[in-house]
Amino acid sequence: MSTNDNLVTANFISQIITNDLKEHKNEGKVATRFPPEPNGYLHIGHAKSICLNFGMAAEFKGSCNLRFDDTNPEKESIEYMQSIERDVQWLGFEWAGLHHASDYFEQLYGYAVQLIEQGLAYVDSLSAEQIRIYRGTLTEPGKESPDRDRSIADNLDLFQRMRAGDFADGQYVLRAKIDMASPNINMRDPALYRIRRVHHQRTGDAWCIYPMYDYTHCISDAIEGITHSLCTLEFEDHRPLYDWVLDQLPDLAHPQQIEFARLQLEYTIVSKRKLNQLVMEKHVQGWDDPRMPTIAGLRRAGFTPKSIRDFCERIGVTKQNSWIEMGVLEYCIREDLNENALRAMAVLQPLRVVIDNYPDEQTEELEVSNHPQRHELGKRIVPFSKVILIEQDDFAEIPPPKFKRLIDGGEVRLRGSYVIKCNEVIKNAEGKIIELRCSYDADTLGKNPEGRKVKGVIHWVSEPHSQPAEIRLYDRLFKVPQPDNEENFLDAINPDSLHVLCDARVEASLVNAQAETGYQFERTGYFCLDTQDSVEGKLVFNRTVSLRDGGWGND
């Protein structure tokens, strides 16, 4: 792991591991793993698991593997694997070993044969629907398959022929022989292998049978020497099966499965199926759309690894599922960017200002600090000229109460520059204000005007020196806190989750804006350069978060 000191504070999992070490379990070793299925991009919920698994390994000077659960090739791809590796590294973590469940296909098959030889697994010809019916319900026990008492010899023969490709997809499955009357439905003779003729992204066409997750996962943990298998609460009912499989294979180590509450973040969904639906149906512009809760989306939106790690630490690790307010995540990124983001000026909806008493051909190069509290971040040059641009909202012909910006006949200070006074308002034929004619006080650069007090300060850019930019103002993708609770989650999509300003202008220094560098556009919000869509002559900036609490898209 890299720079992630104090990532995980004391929690019940930390206490369990501490007690295990005191009792000299696992020879004093701690080994965890992060085992995603490569069937989509990682999301904010995965970030919690990543931080926990890698954090526990770091806290106890152990190791953490990255392992791909690639047993369902129909939905998996190399693209997803690459994105997962990229996201884990971007978050600041380094794995001890990179593994795939497919690395163990031969061993998994051998252990299945061993279970058959022990009379603990059988080949079943029931269809998927029949198996579902035979399984029973939460209140009624299941009933045994007619194939349950098939001989060991016949089971071994059929299983070998399943592997050889002698049967059609779905014709047979291999099931564990446990207890069809168990109160835990997961223990009612669960499937261990199914026939599926699908090209695998790593093993090609070498296999036409693939192991099930519950069977694969525990054995993979054991093979890798994992000591603590950390997973979310939905796997709590699967733990007896995890333990049963390993209990029947005494040559293998027996990791301890520990469950924790999954991350449920308001105004988002974290179902990969639903996220994939958003992408495939083009409700968003891809897995890395800044409105998506994916790590790639958050990264493109301008979130930093530090802010996400901080968020995961703040929400803690518990055994109780609960909803986390979006404001917690927003607070974490604001805190990071307020401390580290470079300051700049951008005018999102420009209004032209001509300073009549400023020399026509003159340009001043004003030195402005990149951060008011961090002088080590240096200064930049901001050009000042006769024609500048200000925000349309920073001028009011008929000002509302307590308006401290520019008005007709009034004065305002330009950030880091002079005091100007509005002398004339120019309108077009439709009555829209298109230009202000102003004058400036040449004695107010860096000091207050003589004999009067100017309260308002606004940002600006020099028109001839500024760069054209497209500004994307993102808001929450969903308009309700818990969209998963809606009858159709798509009905909860926020139709105003993206507002694009095509005619913005940014200060000249931003022509050199860097990827994954946060910028505070003064008085506007925190932004980052969209490197995918920016082109020469037209920069694109995504708003990460507003300056104040109130939502992604609200100042």
Image (cartoon, rainbow, N blue to C red):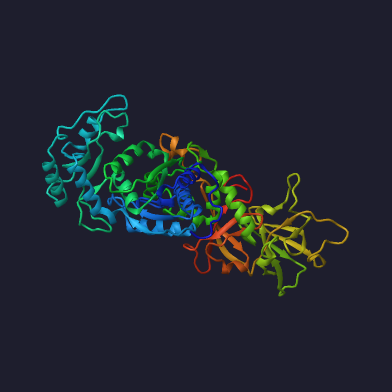
Residue 52 pos. (x, y %): 48, 49
Choose between 171 and 57: the one closer to the eye. Answer: 57
Among the 4 quarters of the image, the one containing residue 355: bottom right
**Left or right of 65 on screen, residue 373:** right
Residue 465 in sight: yes
Among the 4 quarters of the image, the one containing residue 85: bottom left
Q: Residue at x 46, y 40 (%)?
A: 261
Furthest residue to the top?
A: 139
Furthest residue to the right?
A: 451
**Left or right of 527 on screen, residue 223:** left
Residue 302 in sight: no
Residue 174 pos. (x, y %): 20, 42
Choose between 358 and 111: the one closer to the eye. Answer: 111
Q: Is residue 92 above or below residue 400?
A: below
**Left or right of 98 on screen, residue 179:** left
Among the 4 quarters of the image, the one containing residue 340: bottom right
Residue 222 pos. (x, y %): 33, 49
Question: Number of numbered discs present?
Answer: 0
Q: Is residue 107 above or below residue 125?
A: below
Residue 149 pos. (x, y %): 14, 34
Q: Residue at x 36, y 45 (%)?
A: 273
Choose between 367 and 24: the one closer to the eye. Answer: 24
Q: Is residue 93 above or below residue 19?
A: below
